[in-house]
């Protein structure tokens, strides 16, 4: 399939986008951007300001989609507090910095680490203010065959 006609230089080709719903999408977006380091790309709101759809990019690639949890949306996204993701961070020092920002912010919680794994990764586990679990680590995955 040729996607060149639907993709410009600023829009990445189709990818996997984990999705979640938030009880307070605007507050969760603030935590994810200000504390964890995601970048808000877009947030579409309705007339009352409720976030219907948002996209947050991870600086080194990938991202998530999310919106406000509301009636009728439970089947479209992981409900608030039940999301889990592993996020690759290229630098071990940034793992320590994420842990420090979470501790300083007070809205989330470091649930484990920072620590080193048996397979050479430097990780930290975090719970955001809505109860979602985030694992940040330097492990890029095994080489592809």
Image: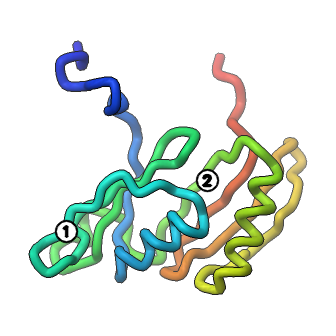
Q: Residues within 10 Å of mark 2 (few under 14, many from 20)?
A: some
Quadrant placement of the C terminus: top right
Position above or below: 62 against 105: above
Measured as percent of width and height from the top left, residue 45 is found at: 19, 68
Label 1: which secondary element: strand
Q: CA distance from mark 1 to mark 2?
A: 28 Å
Q: Residue furthest left?
A: 47
Picture residue at 59% right of the left edge, 84% below the top: 107
Position above or below: 3 against 107: above
Q: Residues within 10 Å of mark 1 (few under 14, many from 20)?
A: some
Measured as percent of width and height from the top left, residue 96 is found at: 80, 61
Horizontal arrangement in the rendering, residue 45 relative to residue 98 (left or right)? left
Mark closer to the chain start, 1 or 2: 1
Measured as percent of width and height from the top left, residue 7 is found at: 25, 25
Horizontal arrangement in the rendering, residue 91 relative to residue 32 (left or right)? right
Picture residue at 73% right of the left edge, 76% below the top: 111
Picture residue at 61% right of the left edge, 75% below the top: 127
Label 2: which secondary element: strand
């Amino acid at each position: 399939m040729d996607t060149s006609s639907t993709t410009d230089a600023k829009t990445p080709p189709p990818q996997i986008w984990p999705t979640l719903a938030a009880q307070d999408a605007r507050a969760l977006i603030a935590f994810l951007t200000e504390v964890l380091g995601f970048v808000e790309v877009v947030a579409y709101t309705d007339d009352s300001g409720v976030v219907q759809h948002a996209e947050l990019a991870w600086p080194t690639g990938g991202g998530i989609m999310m919106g406000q949890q509301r009636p009728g949306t439970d089947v479209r996204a992981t409900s608030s507090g039940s999301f889990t993701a592993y996020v690759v961070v290229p630098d071990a020092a940034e793992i320590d910095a994420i842990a420090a920002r979470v501790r300083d912010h007070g809205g989330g919680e470091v649930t484990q680490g920072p620590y080193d794994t048996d397979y050479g990764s430097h990780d930290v586990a975090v719970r955001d203010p809505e109860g979602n679990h985030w694992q940040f680590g330097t492990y890029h995955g095994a080489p592809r065959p």
